[in-house]
Image: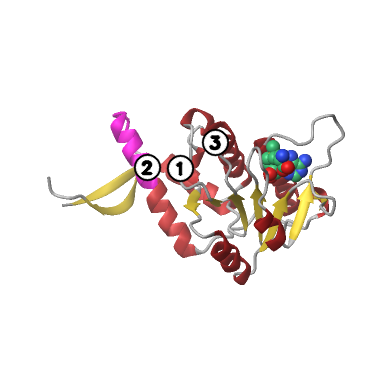
Amino acid sequence: MDKTLLIQEKRLLRIKECLQKRQPDLRLYLENVQNHHNVSAIIRTADAVGILHIYYSLQKNLPVNDAITCGAHKWVILEKVEDQADFLKKMKSQGFQIVATALTPDAIDFRDIDYTRPLVIVMGNELEGISEELKNKADIICKIPMHGMVQSLNVSVATALILYEAQRQREQKGFYSKKRISSELEAELIKKWGIYEVLKKKSRGRLKGSCLCDLGKVCFKKE
Ligand SMILES: C[S@@+](CC[C@H](N)C(=O)[O-])C[C@H]1O[C@@H](n2cnc3c(N)ncnc32)[C@H](O)[C@@H]1O
């Protein structure tokens, strides 16, 4: 049975505005980041900075805590990496540079990177950090300078510092002022994200009012 999906105009505009600012060529890869607080805080920061693609290598489902993401996980594309070597090769062939974050002696200061290039930023496991495989295959290794007694930062804090430096540089170059995702992806995400909204509002009985937009047709299975 075909049904027309109706969405509040205000929410549809909000989704469109958000998509206008998404940065499809700045991506995040969580290499075995495990802790649900960390994963969730990272996703929330990534959404704030305009990241669209987040990859992860955990073999179980990504541990997402809704109370920490505040729903941000619904507005990004989360993708499991099954084969890391393959993934790195694919990203490189698409023109991305791989930036590993690690406190190795040869690592450069994270503020010296040009974040306006297509990049995949890799964050490592809470205990073991980035794997040797990734360090060897990375185009750049960067570190956040540490001057205290403790060796490293919490992974979600490190992610936030790096992503906000990327955001600063991209803003300076006007990357947030014009749409950077393809029209096809934009249309696909408007529909997908719009459906979340419709379902959420319907389940709370709040989908009424005069400013409703047509999101298109959806096909429901017969009971
Ligand atoms: C708690 S740290 C892991 C520490 C681990 N003992 C190591 O040797 O890397 C978890 C992740 O946060 C990021 N990180 C934390 N502090 C960092 C720093 N100062 N510079 C760059 N990355 C950092 C890296 O991605 C790291 O893999």
Report the residue marked by disc 1: 74
Q: Which residues are magenta?
A: 194-206
Colour mode of the rendering: secondary structure
The quadrant where ligand 1 appears is: top right
Q: Nearer the viewer, mark 1 or mark 2?
A: 1
Q: Residue furthest right?
A: 147
Q: Amino acid at mark 1?
A: Lys
**CB contact under 8 Å: marks 1 and 2:** yes
Residue 178 quadrant: bottom right
Report the residue marked by disc 2: 196
Label number found at residue 40: 3
Q: CA distance from mark 1 to mark 3?
A: 12 Å
In this view, the residue in front, 35 or 164, is 35
Could you tell me which secondary element the residue under label 1 belongs to?
Answer: helix
Task: Please give the name of the residue rendered at 44% of the width and 41% of the height, measured from the top-left corner.
Answer: 11
Task: Please give the name of the residue rendered at 27% of the width and 54% of the height, measured from the top-left corner.
Answer: 217
Q: Position of residue 86 (x, y in %)?
A: 54, 65
Could you tell me which secondary element the residue under label 2 belongs to?
Answer: helix
Q: Amino acid at mark 3?
A: Ser
Q: CA distance from mark 3 to mark 2?
A: 19 Å
Quadrant location, the C terminus: top left
Could you tell me which secondary element the residue under label 3 belongs to?
Answer: helix
**CB contact under 8 Å: marks 1 and 3:** no
